[in-house]
Amino acid sequence: MHFQHSTLVKGKDIFPTVRHIQYRGTNFELGRQLAELNIANHGDSLEKHRVVDPVYARAQREYLQRNWPAQWERARGVASAFGADPEDDRYDFSVLWYNMDLPLRPGCSNAFYPPHRSTDGHAYLSRNYEFSTGTLADVFGIPLPPEINAQLAAMMGEPYIMEWQPTDGGYTSWTIHSNDLLGGAFDGMNSAGLAVALMADETAMGTLHEPHMGPTDKVGIGELQIVRLLLDSCATVAEAKHLLLGVKHLYQFVPCHYIIADASGDSFVFQFSLGRNHERFLEGGGEAQVCSNHAILDSQNGEIPTLTLANNSEWRYATLQARVNDRDRFTPSEMRANSAAVSISQLTQLLLEDPSFRTIAANVDSRTLWYTLYDLTAGLVEVDFYLASSLTESGEYIEQRSEIFSFAVPGKIEEVAGGERIALPI
């Protein structure tokens, strides 16, 4: 077993603390190591895993044993770290929450470029992840005394870069986790060249929102766990579709949709009908595909709306689509520029230029917390993080970001003569 834990960015005068975990070994040991880390870094305890109704804990355990054996092995490792029986129906060991006790509201914009739309012939996923820099009380308007609020951690202030190389089940993968060390993957790529990113579905949230907060009375795969399950299990878009249709879906906090793409150039957006009674695949058809936070099937007219706070998801979608349609091929730098054009930094600056939005825009605390560029063909990732921002007297928004960190997905799988797949040395 190899487990290495380091800090890439140390938050104090800047926003985030970004940690990096590299692991190779069994899924059981991975679960135990992550649970011990959650205890040390985030004050996890056995009591926090207690459930209200043991019927649900047992059903969830049996569901994982049947449908996601790798996650069940990790859950066994979590129980081991607490000195508990993994089949004790008083507890749910399938999650490792931290810094999250209320609903999530993530925002993001994504663009997938198939090989024929890039100058180097590689497939890329370009990803903005956006969220508030505030505490739970800040985000949800909970009135707390300032001295108490100052002691709370920012909801998204401690992301983890995870490099997992399980030796007993699941593809090797590179992911960014937050809020749940075990299954809380927000985006990532595996060694087969499959990339996945989630987006909150704001359209669904505006109709019927039924959060099931915490690890109680729920059975199935939650909205964050979907990313981890797909990366553990699937090599291609076709495999991902088959898996998604067989999953018992649930959301614990907010309904989400997903963009899934593979190195061949195939992609789709997976989302539910607003009543969540059936699944929908929005096909990429081998072409470039963009998505943001509203129901994508309802936004195909191609017009860029006038930007307001209320329609910023539609504005981001249409603006990004127009930029992607502007030329035939893009360099990685141009893909980065396309995503930057719909980042919170750009959106804030545009709103500041409108007198009617100036005061509101100056107080918005959402930021593009990280930007990731996935090269699905080569198995390479670039990522940078929001650090700090300021507003000049003239109304100019200034943002400070980290250096660009570069990674190679361990064990990248490539095609060799005869179609045989081999894992490269790690």
Image (tube, helix red, strand yellow):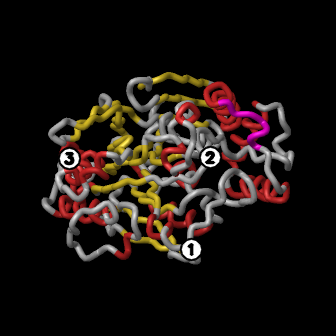
As displayed, is residue 42 above or below residue 187?
Answer: above
Q: Which of marks 3 and 2 is in front?
A: 2
Q: Which residue has dot 1 on it? A: 276
Q: Residues within 10 Å of mark 3 (few under 14, many from 20)?
A: some
| Residue located 46% across and 41% down the image | 134
Disc number for residue 101: 2
Tag of residue 337: 3
Q: Which region shows up in magenta?
A: 43-49
From this viewpoint, is residue 408 visible? yes
Q: Nearer the viewer, residue 217 or 324?
A: 217
**Label 2 near label 3: C-beta < 8 Å?**
no
Indicate the position of residue 209 as horizontal and vertical percent values: 57, 67
Query: What residue lies at 40% left-to-right and 44% top-to-bottom?
Result: 414
Q: In this view, does 180 lie to the left or right of 55?
A: left
Q: How crowded is mark 1: few (under 14 residues within 10 Å), some or many (20 or more)?
A: some
Q: Earlier in the sequence, mark 1 or mark 3?
A: 1
Quadrant position of residue 315: bottom left
Is residue 62 rendered to the left or right of residue 371? Answer: right
Q: Nearer the viewer, residue 60 or 213?
A: 213
> Residue sitting at 65 percent across and 25 percent down?
40
Image coordinates for residue 312, horizontal then vertical, percent: 31, 61
Determine whether the residue tagged by mark 3 lies in a helix, strand or loop. Answer: helix
